[in-house]
Amino acid sequence: MELLWVRHGEPERIAPGTGVRADPALTPLGREQAQRLADWLAVESVDAVVCSPLRRAVETATPIAASCGVEIEIVDGLVEYDNDSDHYIPMEEMRATNDDRWQAMVDVRWDAFGADPPEVFRARVDATVAELIARFAGKRVVAVCHGGVINVIFGSVLGIEQPLWFEPGYSSLSRMFASRTGIRSVASLNELAHLEAKRERP
């Protein structure tokens, strides 16, 4: 099967201190990114669209599913490692300001900001991927999720132990081939051409 892993579009910033789980919507730019990707994927034959339950992922998946003529299926196992956080600060902002939370992410000290332990997160993601491969054998499936999820998935294929080793762009597309026998390979990583170009149906 072919799995097309999509990071959500740009989400709104939610400052700390809300007291409730942060579940940001997409910004106007994020909605544009999602639509551009949807238009790009409309040229391909997609059998299913699965999605993290978080709002930024669902709002990214919605135009993709519409353009491909399929329904969205919510998969709880695709949520991000910090899905219970009361704030959402874009990673690029944390990196630019050398935020303590950014350094904790890099150092894999996820307990410092109340996230799932890396080994728990990896086990959940690995189990979810195995389930998708078993269910959709021979199909092409778009999976809309989060940067950390994509890091773990492709890191497992490439033998990279660091849970966060690259930064997928907003609405980026990364492709992998997988079989039920356990063979997985990387076809592409961090595709962003859809943000600049258009494809026409043959």
Image: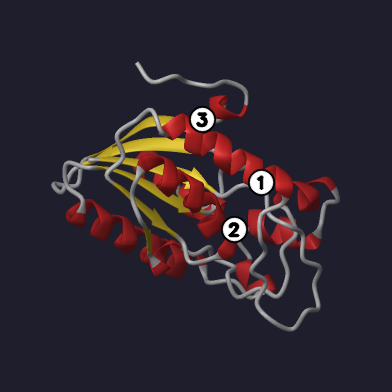
What type is the residue that disc 2 sits on?
A: Arg
Disc 3 residue crowd, few under 14, some 14–19, many 20+, Cα 10 Å: some
Q: Mark 1 to mark 3: distance in Å?
A: 16 Å
Q: Are marks 1 and 2 in contact (CB under 8 Å)?
A: yes
Note whether residue 35 is visible: yes
The residue singled out by tag 1 in the image is: 30
Report the residue at 59% width, 68% height from top.
82
What type is the residue that disc 3 sits on?
A: Glu
The residue singled out by tag 3 in the image is: 191
Q: Are marks 3 and 2 in contact (CB under 8 Å)?
A: no
Residue at the limit of the structure toward the top, as seen here: 202
Image quarter of residue 202: top left
Note whether residue 166 is visible: no
Query: Above or below — where is 24 with respect to 70?
Result: below
Q: Mark 3 to mark 2: distance in Å?
A: 19 Å
Colour basis: secondary structure
What type is the residue that disc 1 sits on?
A: Gly
Which residue occupies the foreground of this view, 101 or 192? 192
Q: From the viewer's perspective, tell me whether residue 95 is left or right of residue 187.
A: right
* First of labels 1, 3 by sequence position: 1
* First of labels 1, 2 by sequence position: 1
Q: Position of residue 19 (x, y in %)?
A: 74, 83
* First of labels 3, 2 by sequence position: 2
Q: Quadrant of the N terminus?
A: top left
